[in-house]
Amino acid sequence: MTQNNLQELKEIWAQWDDEFNQLFYCNYGDLPYLLDIKVDKHLFRALVQFWNSAYSCFTFGKVDLVPTIEEYIALLCYPRIQADKVYSRAVNVSTFVKKLMNITGKMLGYIDEAVSDLSDQLDRRVTPVPTILAETFRSLNVCQRTGEGRFIGCAQLILAWFCSYFWKVDKVSYRVFSENCSPLKELAATLRRDDIIEERWMVILQNL
C-alpha cells in the first residue's frame, strides 16, 4: 500500500512565520498537526487487514470499531464548524489562485488544488469530515479487496483515531475527546516505536 508524499506541504508550512501559523490554527483547527504525524506503515498495513468490507468497520475478534464524524471532528478540533453543513464542491467555485489568496493572503508557491479547496470550505464553516470518511471507507474497501493500492483517505487521521483508544498518561486512559485536549498535537509530539514488524502487529491486533 502506498500513500501520497506530504513533503511539499511541509515545506510550504515551514515558510510561514509563527504569527501566521497561529492564525491558521485559530481558523482551521489542528489540521496542520497531521503533517507531523508519522505513518507507521507496518501498523497501517496490519490494520487494513482487519477492515470488514461487508460492514464497513474494523473487526477485532468480537469487537467492531469504526471512525465516526463526531470523533474525526473532535480529533481535528475544528473551532467554528457546523456539523450539519456537509462538505461539497460548489457549482460556481472560485478560481484556484483566488481561493489560495483568500486563504493565505499571499502566493507561496504551488499547492495542490484539493488542499486549497479543503481550506476554502473550512473557512465557510463547512465540515469536510463526511467526505474524508467516505474516501477512507471506499479506499479501504478497494485496497483490502485487491490486496494492494494507493490509500486515498488520510492515513495520519485514521491512525490517530485508532491510537486514541489506547493512549494512557500515568497508566490512566487518556481522555482524548475532552474539550481541552488537542489529540493531534499530543500524538505529533509523542515518540512512538516504528520498529514493530507487520507480523507482530497482526498478533497484537488479533489479541485486542
Image: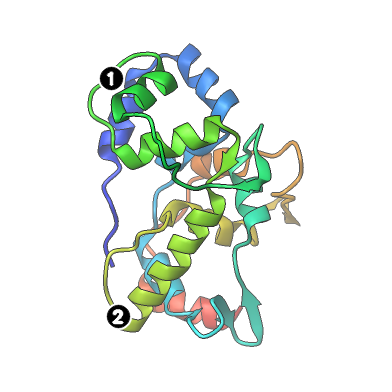
Q: Is residue 104 left or right of residue 187?
A: left
Q: Nearer the viewer, residue 113 or 57?
A: 113
Q: Residue at x 29, y 17 (%)?
A: 107
Q: Is residue 112 above or below residue 132?
A: above
In this view of the protein, can residue 71 be seen by the observer? yes
In this view of the protein, can residue 186 be seen by the observer? no
Residue topped by disc 1: 108
Could you give the CA–CA distance between mark 2 and mark 1, rounded to whole angstroms?
38 Å
Residue 33 image point, x, y percent: 48, 37
Of the residues shown, which amino acid type is indicated by label 2? Answer: Gly
Residue 147, label in figure? 2
Residue 205 image point, x, y percent: 53, 77
Residue 100 image point, x, y percent: 35, 25
Q: Is residue 85 left or right of residue 101?
A: right
Q: Residue at x 62, y 44 (%)?
A: 183
Q: Is residue 122 above or below residue 150?
A: above
The residue tagged with tag 2: helix, strand or loop? loop
Q: Nearer the viewer, residue 52 or 85?
A: 85
Residue 110 image point, x, y percent: 23, 29
Q: Is residue 86 left or right of residue 115?
A: right
